[in-house]
């Protein structure tokens, strides 16, 4: 696709996106270094490039042929870029296939900003937490994450732009409490926002929120990931009113209507300014590379036109895909 056609597509979808003022003083940290928030453009806040489900103690970067992964993934990223998307947030955590060298290479080749993360993923029955957690305090865990944030990941100098942790349910186990505490400590030292994959709906999410508040983490730095898992929206509304980020990140051709309903309710409550959307799609599966890759384009090909048919304005769409992500991922510098 020619640059003009691309620019046209982007400007027709988001007329005002180019002249947006920076949300606050600060930067967004991509795998190729910090950029100004207004450079993020259209952003998908929750996708995956590669996932390795082997388990924490068996997964490491390079357990696969990087070139094979690039050949597999790059066409999907280029297709996303051709839709006008500028930034992709990769939500694959450490011990689940995070490979920042791969992300950096793909970012350069696709012309997409890519953001990676620090943190440990405690969901999926803690299969992806390294066993060393037993010997570590929350301060020691935080020290590892802060070190990644300051010096870069695995000696690469590539820094994370947010934290990604994971929780299944409440009551929290000892490990999950350590992880949440480590996130609060890391936040205080780095300002990185805390994305919490929350498997089982509103109750654990409310408990995360309470715990982070008790540690003086502002809720504007907490992302309730997979908020769609809680069907009744009253808790999302309560959290959003307190400044939290509500991530509806399962958008696919099969659930456009239910996601439209969610957005309608958030909009009716005046809370579209706290909502972010994405597909949770991808990915190169290290354990089963033949697994079908879910494309990152449904939001552009189907969901945006559907929203517009249902009285969402260009400004609403821009809020969800440009302004809100820029606010979430801007770290004060
Ligand atoms: Zn995900």
Image (cartoon, grey):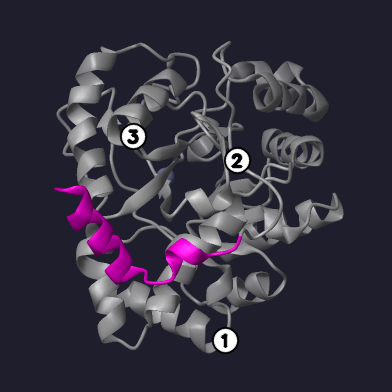
Residue to which mark 3 is pinned: 49
Residue 46 falls left or right of residue 243: left
**Residue 84 percent location from the top left of the image:** 29, 54
Mark 3, Cα crowd under 10 Å, few <14 / some 14-19 / many 20+, is: many
Magenta extent? 1-21
Residue to which mark 2 is pinned: 162
**CB under 8 Å between callouts 3 and 2?**
no
Disc on the earlier residue, 3 or 2: 3
Q: Which mark is residue 269?
A: 1
**Residue 138 percent location from the top left of the image:** 78, 29
The number of numbered discs placed on residues in the rendered structure image is 3
The Cα–Cα distance between marks 3 and 2, rounded to whole angstroms, is 16 Å
Q: Residue at x 24, y 63 (%)?
A: 8
Residue 75 falls left or right of residue 130: left
- Residue 294 vs residue 89, the one in the foreground: 89
Residue 271 falls left or right of residue 45: right
Ligand 1: quadrant of the figure: top left
Disc on the earlier residue, 1 or 2: 2
Q: Residue at x 27, y 46 (%)?
A: 81
Disc on the earlier residue, 3 or 1: 3
Q: Which mark is residue 146?
A: none
């Amino acid at each position: 696709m020619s640059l003009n056609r691309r620019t046209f597509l982007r400007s027709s979808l988001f007329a005002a996106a180019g002249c947006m003022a920076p949300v606050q003083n600060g930067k967004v940290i991509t795998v190729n270094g910090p950029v100004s928030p207004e450079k993020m453009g259209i952003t998908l806040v929750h996708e995956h490039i590669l996932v390795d489900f082997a388990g924490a103690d068996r997964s490491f970067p390079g357990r696969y042929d990087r070139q094979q992964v690039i050949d597999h993934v790059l066409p999907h990223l280029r297709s996303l870029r051709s839709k006008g998307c500028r930034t992709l947030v990769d939500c694959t955590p450490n011990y689940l296939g995070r490979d920042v060298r791969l992300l950096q290479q793909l970012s350069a080749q696709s012309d997409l900003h890519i953001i990676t993360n620090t943190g440990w993923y405690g969901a999926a029955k803690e299969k992806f937490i390294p066993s060393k957690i037993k010997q570590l305090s929350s301060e020691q865990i935080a020290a590892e994450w802060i070190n990644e944030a300051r010096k870069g990941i695995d000696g690469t100098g590539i820094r994370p732009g947010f934290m990604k942790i994971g929780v299944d349910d409440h009551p929290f186990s000892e490990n999950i409490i350590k992880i949440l505490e480590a996130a609060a400590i890391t936040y205080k030292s780095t300002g990185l926002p805390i994305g919490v994959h929350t498997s089982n709906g509103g109750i654990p999410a409310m408990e995360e929120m309470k715990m982070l508040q008790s540690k003086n983490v502002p809720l504007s730095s907490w992302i309730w990931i997979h908020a769609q898992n809680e069907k009744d929206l009253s808790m999302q509304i309560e959290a959003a009113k307190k400044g939290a980020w509500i991530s509806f990140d399962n958008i696919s051709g099969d659930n456009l209507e239910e996601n439209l309903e969610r957005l309608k309710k958030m909009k009716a409550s005046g809370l579209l300014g706290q909502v972010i959307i994405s597909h949770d799609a991808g990915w190169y599966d290290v354990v089963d590379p033949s697994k079908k890759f879910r494309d990152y384009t449904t939001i552009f090909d189907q969901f945006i036109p559907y929203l517009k048919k249902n009285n969402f304005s260009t400004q609403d769409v821009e809020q969800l895909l440009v302004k809100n992500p820029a606010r979430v991922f801007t770290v004060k510098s």
